Image (cartoon, rainbow, N blue to C red):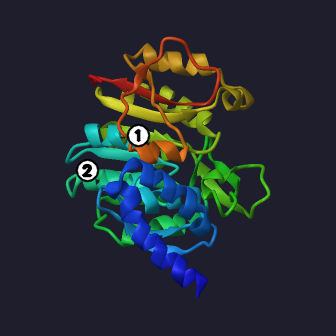
Amino acid sequence: MKNAIARATALMVRPLLRGGAPRRLRARLHREIWRWINWRGLEFVARTEAGARMRLNSCDLIQQYIFWFGVWEPNLTAFLNRILRPGDTFVDVGANIGYFTLLAARRVGPTGHVVAIDAAPPIFGLLQANLAMNETAMVRAVNAAVTGETGDVTITMGPDDNIGQTSLGGGTGKAYRVVGEPLTSLLTPDELAAARAFKIDVEGAEAPVLNDLATHVDRLRHDVAIIVEISPAAFQASGLDLQAVLDRFTSRGFVPYRLANSYGVQEYIDRDHGRPPERIETWPAEQFDLLLVRGMDL
């Protein structure tokens, strides 16, 4: 009974949190309703702001934001909405349950192409389920880990309240052995050459992925964007020199920007969406979302 009441309350409150109420009321509803409902792990089918249908669980961080607000990482969402056009190709490395995959699929349309890659079998199953609920004939889904070299690797599941923390190596969650391949091996030559944008978010394992792309940078199109979560500490642990890898891009005409990204709920309540990227003059010492662009005016 309590779950039924919580479900009915969530469906009533959600339109208000998505902008149908004044800001103060949205903040109050978040304080009084959000935590009472999310921990229950309720299953919903909801639409994103882009119109994609998704099956969502209220316990998981990413899924609860999508359910309540219809959007995830709003500044990245706004950037992709701006640059992706019908017929484009988009590569989603670390696709999770498919939010950015589905966003891109709707932007590039039936003449475009999307490659969605995720390693963990349970998450890949959720991705496939969400793809099946939408018009996604243009999407190629790949169940593999993106690594620096070919070979089987261990993927450890993140906690139920943040499956996005699923990662290579350590952790206390259920472990899976999966195939690992470099990104440029998982993509066809045409996919690599046609990609308008790459989104790379693989929980601290981004260094070898970015290094692989840097090795093949001359095969990329002249107007391309690479969005990647950068952890200087993870780069150092990988044995790769972050500055040296980035220099291989900037020497080929890429310009570095920082893309604002906050996981705090206030940005969503305020609907402070679409802040433009900021040109990087000094490399941040902390983790940040890096945007490398070539042939684009921002």
Q: Is residue 69 visible?
A: yes
The residue indicated by pointer 1 is 76
- Report the side of 158 relative to 78 (left or right): right
What label sits on residue 184 in the rendered view?
none
The total of numbered circles placed on residues is 2
Determine the secondary structure under disc 2: helix
- Report the side of 133 relative to 95 (left or right): left
Q: Quadrant of the C terminus?
A: top left
At 44% from the left and 29% from the top, the residue drawn is 291
In the image, residue 210 sits, relative to residue 99, either above or below, namely above
The front one of 114 and 67 is 67
The front one of 111 and 263 is 263
**Residue 203 occupies which quadrant of the picture?**
top right
Disc 2 residue type (three-letter): Arg
Q: Residue furthest bottom?
A: 1
The front one of 35 and 82 is 35
Q: Quadrant of the N terminus?
A: bottom right
Q: Position of residue 232 (x, y in %)?
A: 65, 26
Disc 1 residue type (three-letter): Leu
Q: Residues within 10 Å of mark 2 (few under 14, many from 20)?
A: many
Identify the mark nearer the N-term, 1 or 2: 1
The mark closer to the camera, 1 or 2, is 1
The residue indicated by pointer 2 is 107
In the image, residue 202 sits, relative to residue 66, either above or below, namely above
The front one of 47 and 107 is 47
Q: Position of residue 277 (x, y in %)?
A: 39, 26
Determine the secondary structure under disc 1: helix
In the image, residue 79 sits, relative to residue 11, either above or below, namely above
Q: Position of residue 28 (x, y in %)?
A: 50, 55
